[in-house]
Image (spheres, helix red, strand yellow):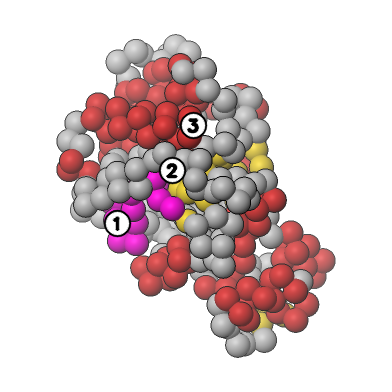
Amino acid sequence: MSQAFPDYLDVDYTDGEGETPDDYPAIQDKIEKAIEVTKTGLEQYENPAVMWTGGKDSTLTLYFIKEVAEKFDLEMPPTVFIDHYQHFDEIIDFVKYWADEWDLEVIWARNENVGEYVEENGFEPGDDIDISELSEHNQHHVREILEYEDETFPFLLDTYVGNHLLKTVALNDTLESHNIDGVISGIRWDEQESRADETFFSPRHDPDIYPPHDRIQPILQFEERAVWDAFWHFAIPDTVENYPDEGYVPESSDDLPEGVEQTDIPVSPKYFAGFRSLGSEVSTDKSAEEPAWLQDMENTTERAGRAQDKEDLMERLRDLGYM
């Protein structure tokens, strides 16, 4: 990372401070802010990258980036996909398919040392990993950073050690190896308490914790329902051939405009199947039978289908560099 970082930047780290989605009451207000933040991010950072999970938030963010890059003749940054080895197969297929359709460069962020150890031993999620068999780099994170004292940990995302090694270490190692100075991510204020105080440009400059970089967060101001509204009435009509210009909200995968198939739409099939959050194959269940955008978002929890997601765990992971 450049010694000058972040001196070459001119961004307002207080932008969004004290705000909530209510400060952007109309969908057009939210979209205009997303475009403004995205444009600033693409112009200001020398080597940005987009966090892409295949989920709705990061895919909507990716749509804004593609549109802004094309409109203002800016370079399209690469995407970073954290492969934690416990994804739904449909998510991996979705990312590969749309990366090809949109001509995206995908950087696959993996903790390969853990992945190779698991594969060599034929481990399944939940099996215990012997910490002494891991690399010095991973042992350092477990013993010195997390201060974890047990000899083993389960191969699961729903644990402090598993989540840190498979997600945070994989991400931070990728940021360092690719010299990334700005991470554009699709997090939202309403998603978790640990994200409620985030700003549109959020510094991560402590070299003892992560490779110094900034987080650029264009859709903080969106609520879950607004994300789906933006998809069905703006992003999809704008990108999918034969989709009505005014938009259309399908009630199932069979209820699509004439000439449009589910595979034509940049929305994961898991959302059509009733999932509202896509965590991992091991720890995430569908929330209901109807598609995600038809569920009761105001009176239920978006991440209710996830086994993990305790606020204290998420806060600790974010302190160590996760999203």
What residue range appears in magenta? Answer: 187-203
**Residue 269 rendering spot, x and y as whole percentages:** 50, 38
Disc 1 or disc 3, which is closer to the eye?
Answer: 3
- Amino acid under disc 2: Ile
The amino acid type, in three-letter code, at marker 1 is Asp
Q: Amino acid at mark 3?
A: Leu
The label on residue 42 is 3
197 falls in the magenta region: yes
Name the residue located 58 percent from the left edge and 33 percent from the top edge: 77
Residue 119: x, y in percent? 78, 63
Q: Residue at x 49, y 45 (%)?
A: 7
On screen, residue 151 versus residue 320, left or right, reads right
Front position in the image: 125 or 27? 27
Left or right: residue 293 versus residue 167 is left
Whole-percent x, y for residue 125 in the image = 63, 67
Q: Mark 2 and mark 1: span between their CA atoms? A: 14 Å
Pointer 2 or 3: first along the chain:
3
Q: In terms of image quadrants, where is residue 223? A: top left
Disc 2 to disc 3, C-alpha distance: 10 Å
Q: Is residue 22 left or right of residue 235?
A: left
Q: Nearer the viewer, residue 15 or 228?
A: 15
What main secondary structure does the magenta stretch of the protein show? loop
Q: Is there CB contact under 8 Å for labels 2 and 1?
A: no
Could you classify mark 3 by the number of other residues whose Cα lies within 10 Å: few (under 14), some (14-19), or many (20 or more)? many
Disc 3 secondary structure class: helix
**Marks 1 and 3, Cα distance to the nearest angstrom?**
23 Å
Between residue 65 and residue 95, name the one nearer to us.
65
Mark 2 lies on residue: 216
The crowding category of the residue bearing disc 1, from other C-alpha atoms within 10 Å (few below 14, some 14 to 19, many at least 20), is: few
**Which mark identifies residue 197?**
1
SS class of the residue under badge 2? strand
